[in-house]
C-alpha cells in the first residue's frame, strides 16, 4: 500500500533490468475518498541516477493516479531500452526532466500518453541531453495547448537532442538534412 515512490531506486548504480512486475503502483497518488481530488503521490526521481541500467520495462505500472514523474529516469546514462508506453498520464502535471540525460536512448513510444486536460503541464528539460534520441512517438492525447504557456515550461525541452527532427507539418529540404 505504498502511496509515494519518490526516489525509490535513486542512485542504485548496480540496478539493471529489474523485474518489477510485483510492484503495486495502483495506490500511488490515490483519490481522496471524500472528493474527486488526488492525494499527493509521485514517481519523481524513482530511477534517477541509476547509471548502469540498460533496459527497463514498466509496461505493467498502474499510473492512473500519479501526479508527476519529474526526473523519473533522469541521468540514467546507460539506458537504451525503456517501455513506458502504457503509462496513464492524464492526472500528471509534471514531466520536468523525466528523460533528461539518457545518453543511449534512441526511441520513445509515448503514443498512448495524454496530457492532463486541466492544462498547465510542465515539460521543462523533459528530453534535455538525450543526444542519441531520434524518435519520440506521441498520439492525439499529447495536446501541446495543455503545456503551460510560460517560456520556462518549454525551455530546454529538447536541448542537446542533436539527432531528433520532425513533428506535425515538418518538411525537409537539402536531401533530408533540415
Image (tube, helix red, strand yellow):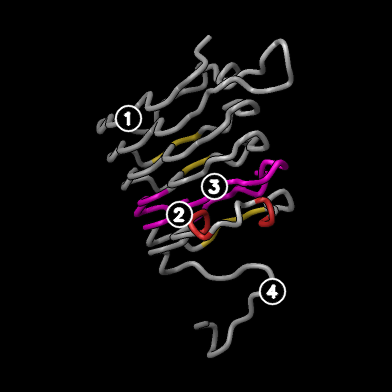
Where does label 2 land, which residue?
Answer: 127
Q: CA distance from mark 2 to mark 3?
A: 12 Å
Taking the spot 52% from the left edge, 32% from the top edge, the residue there is 58
Q: Judge depth for marks 3 and 1 and give the one in front.
A: 3
* Mark carried by residue 114: none
Say whether residue 125 is magenta: yes
Instruction: Work out whether mark 4 precedes mark 2 in sequence or the reverse, and give the earlier one.
Output: 2
**Residue hosting label 1:** 10
Stretch of the chain drawn in magenta = 100-129
Which residue ends up furthest to the bottom in the rendered image? 174
Label annotation for residue 122: 3
Q: Earlier in the sequence, mark 3 or mark 1?
A: 1
Is residue 59 located in the magenta-colored stretch of the structure?
A: no
* Disc 1 residue crowd, few under 14, some 14–19, many 20+, Cα 10 Å: some
The reply to whether the C-beta atoms of the residues labelled 4 and 2 are less than 8 Å apart is: no
Q: Earlier in the sequence, mark 2 or mark 1?
A: 1
Amino acid at each position: 500500500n505504498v502511496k509515494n515512490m519518490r526516489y525509490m531506486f535513486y542512485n542504485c548504480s548496480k540496478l539493471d533490468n529489474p523485474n518489477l512486475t510485483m510492484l503495486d503502483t495502483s495506490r500511488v497518488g490515490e483519490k481522496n475518498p471524500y472528493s474527486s481530488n488526488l492525494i499527493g503521490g509521485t514517481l519523481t526521481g524513482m530511477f534517477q541516477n541509476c547509471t548502469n541500467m540498460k533496459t527497463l520495462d514498466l509496461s505493467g505500472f498502474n499510473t492512473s493516479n500519479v501526479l508527476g514523474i519529474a526526473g523519473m529516469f533522469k541521468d540514467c546514462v546507460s539506458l537504451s531500452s525503456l517501455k513506458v508506453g502504457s503509462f496513464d498520464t492524464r492526472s500528471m502535471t509534471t514531466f520536468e526532466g523525466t528523460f533528461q540525460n539518457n545518453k543511449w536512448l534512441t526511441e520513445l513510444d509515448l503514443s498512448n500518453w495524454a496530457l492532463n486536460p486541466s492544462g498547465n503541464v510542465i515539460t521543462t528539460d523533459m528530453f534535455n541531453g538525450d543526444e542519441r534520441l531520434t524518435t519520440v512517438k506521441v498520439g492525439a492525447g499529447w495536446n501541446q495547448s495543455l503545456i503551460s504557456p510560460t517560456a520556462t515550461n518549454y525551455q530546454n525541452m529538447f536541448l542537446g537532442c542533436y539527432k531528433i527532427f520532425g513533428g506535425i507539418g515538418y518538411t525537409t529540404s537539402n536531401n533530408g538534412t533540415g
